[in-house]
Image (tube, rainbow, N blue to C red):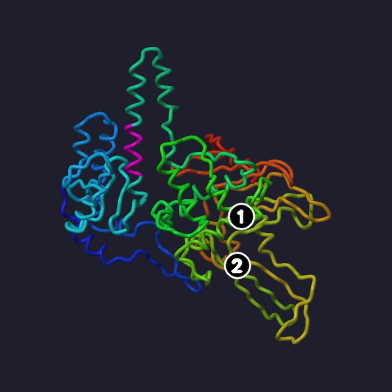
Amino acid sequence: MKTNEYAGAKARLEKSSMASNVTGHGSERMVPHAIGCVHVKQLLSSASHEMAAKSYRQAVRVALELREKKRDIKAFQIRRCRTCQEMLTTTFMCLQCPFVGCRKRKHAEAHCREAGHMFAIDSLSASLFCFACKDFVYNYTFEKIRSEREDLIQLKKLRKQINSTNQFSVEDKLLLEKHTRKPQCQSGLRGFQNMGATCFMSVILQSLIHNPIIRNDFLSGGHNSQKCFRDNCLGCRIDEIFTEFYASPVTTGYGPASLLATAWKTQRSLAGYSEQDAHEFLQFILDQLHATSDLKSSDIDDCNCIVHRTFCGQLQSEVVCLNCKNATVTIDPLMDLSLELKDRKMASKIMNLQQCLEKFTAVEKLETNYSCSFCKSRQEVTKQLSIRRLPLVLSIQLKRFEHAFKSNKIDSHVPFDMELDMTPYTNNKKSSKKYIYELFGVVCHQGKINTGHYTCSMKNREGLWFNFDDVMVTLSSEQQVLASKA
């Protein structure tokens, strides 16, 4: 892995800051351009990106093959620190030269300072480490290289196991090879133990774990629980869950006891074992992640915490006086959309998702008169809602629980698609640019209004759908997801 082609990239990286911004048009604020390690991003955008990928591919191959040779003393010798000969604890293989240094006595860090080589990989797990960030970092390009090599090693082991026995026919061997999958614990595919009516918590946690922007932020050290000293910090508990789901070899259900205890201490209404609403818990946990962020701001439009960078948009309300046609526009933060399901003209008819959005953004005449500042009197007015700025991730709640003369649950299927064009529901609906969202998660409630059970379906990084029912994780399909009662 000998290369000296990083000099130009290194000089640019040393001058970089930890966040990059792009400017939107009109009223759009500055938003982060990338989530994760900016040093890796700049390396991959430099002229030496091909050499970096090649070096990483070679290093990953060496590290993962050495991991399989646990009883081979030569494997330990290759991983040993070149300075102190340490080989039993964590060592780093430099991505830009053959040096191997230990973490315990900081010889790897010393090499980084002396040679200016800021990237290395863990000699056991092949995880990428950035010495500028002083932490393990996640990048899609490098992670794809590592996972492909991991899959290849697992496939070789599977073939070896199949070929080592003669009890199966050729057809059976081919069938086993085709349908047997390695454990997906390091891909976030793991269930949650139900700790007493905590399914509402499990489905929301799964939606965060499989949210690509939230996931990348936590995996790249967006909130480091080892450096946080806040009491009852929900951000630390979420960081611990990401570590368990993406780094631990355990595949059994995870019991979020520490998160549950912290949630009880933070929000007294969650304490106990009564059933809770999943949407309310989502709002609670997003508020807490904002409150425990070092990047938070009291001005939501300028807040750089991961919650507002991911979920926050702007909702526009326009009130028009029917007498003078004067329009009053109000802009409010938008964290999610709550949509009515029943048609106004036909109360028994359940609308599809697009029709729900059309109803939400339709012009309506208000029943009460509005005090017009131009007419100096109360006049009849119309009101229309539209989305002024769309968030990166759009969260939609379908209002299945009715509270009119009596409480009731709408249990009908609401049709939706894998993709959603939000352009018609913005205040720039005539724009040639389309705003297309791709579905990655669905939360469902089975049962009645006062009792029931939550499950969810989530799409993983490989594009496969899985159903999560507490500890039970099963492979699903797009057809099953589209048929669910979200």
In the rendering, at what x and y percent does residue 245 appear?
A: 45, 43
186 on left or right of 201: left
- Pick the residue in front: 314 or 19: 19
Q: Which residues are magenta?
A: 144-153
Taking the spot 42% from the left edge, 70% from the top edge, the residue there is 23
Q: In the rendered structure, find residue 380 and report the number of the disc placed on it.
A: none
The answer to whether residue 22 is magenta is no
Q: Are marks 1 and 2 in contact (CB under 8 Å)?
A: no
- For residue 320, side relative to residue 45 (left or right): right
Image position, residue 295 (x, y; %): 45, 65
Residue positioned 71% across, 41% down in the render: 447
**In the picture shown, does residue 352 fall above or below 255?**
below
Image quadrant in which the N terminus is located: top left
Spot occupied by residue 460 in the image (x, y as percentages of width and height): 47, 43
First in sequence: mark 1 or mark 2? 2
Give the main secondary structure, helix, strand or loop, of the magenta stretch: helix
Residue that mark 1 sits on: 396
Residue 146 in the magenta stretch? The answer is yes
Kind of residue at badge 1? Ile
Q: Residue at x 79, y 49 (%)?
A: 348
Q: Nearer the viewer, residue 370 or 200?
A: 200
Q: Which mark is residue 315?
A: 2
